[in-house]
Image: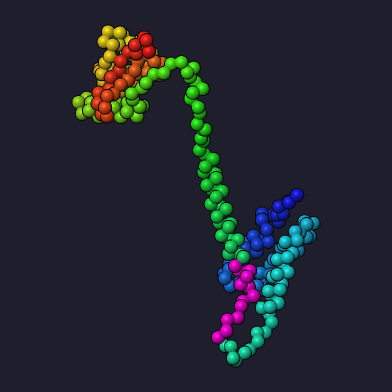
Amino acid sequence: MNVEFKINDFEGPLDLLLHLIKESKMDIMNIEIESITEQYMNYLDSQEKMNLEIASEYLVLASELIEIKSKMLLPREQNNDSVDEYEEDPREELVKRLLEYQTYKEITKVLHEKEAERSNYYTKSPENYSNYSDGEVEIKVDYEIDDLINALKSYLARKKDNKPLNTKVTVNEISVSSRRHDIRNILKEKKKINFFELFPIVSKEYIVATFLAVLEMAKSKELIIKQEENFGEIICEVIPKNE
């Protein structure tokens, strides 16, 4: 079983080393290897005194730091024939690993933020609506809900210039059930009616109650809503009994 080892809040030796470099305000491209090695070893010693097991990977990096330190202390060979020849910095490989780790750490932070942000959204898998049908009745609908909503918006826009909406709160509220009752009576007499004729009163409560009543009646198959063409008249009609 793989167990992730942590010393305090550090995920690994590179995390600890990066922290020490930042705390010392060093340039990661020009690490003061002698100072940072001393800080790293002192930190590991302090953990050992607290009887904490030091993971082998921390000790491996400690040996690498000591090796780099020793290479930095060795005198460089002078060769007049190759003055311009590039000489590899012993810290180069360590700096490369630190930069890569720093990049991954920053990306991980962004991903955690995105994960936390995504947790605020809830989604629902699509359902098979055939489960809610007995398969015996099929009604052809000649409209979509967006068409009805757009028609209502168009109607309200035309009425707005003629008469402002009454937003005063009244004691006698208009219920959806009462509007359904009224619409039933209208359709019993006329059989079909223009959708906009169902709004003789221009008030917010009346319009909302009527609109919801029409939707509920269409859902319960008490009426059918037809529109012959785009932007054409919307007609509410009683569904024939044989349908």
Residue 154: image x %, image y %? 26, 29
- Name the one closer to the observer, 191 or 10: 191
Please tell me which residue is depicted at 70% across the width and 54% down the height of the picture.
6
Q: Which residues are magenta?
A: 84-96
Q: For residue 205, say whether it is visible.
A: no
Please tell me which residue is depicted at 34% across the width and 18% down the height of the picture.
224
Residue 148: image x %, image y %? 32, 26
Residue 121: image x %, image y %? 50, 38
Location of the C terminus (image quadrant)? top left
- Name the one closer to the observer, 207 or 173: 207
Q: For residue 59, say whether it is visible.
A: yes
Q: Find residue 156 and report its image quarter.
A: top left
Residue 35 as seen in the image, left or right of residue 237: right
Residue farthest to the bottom, as pictured: 80
Residue 116: image x %, image y %? 54, 44
166 part of magenta stretch: no
Please tell me which residue is depicted at 57% across the width and 84% down the height of the picture.
85
Residue 134 as seen in the image, left or right of residue 78: left
Please tell me which residue is depicted at 32% across the width and 28% down the height of the picture.
147
Residue 207 as seen in the image, left or right of residue 61: left
Q: Find residue 12 and report its image quarter.
A: bottom right
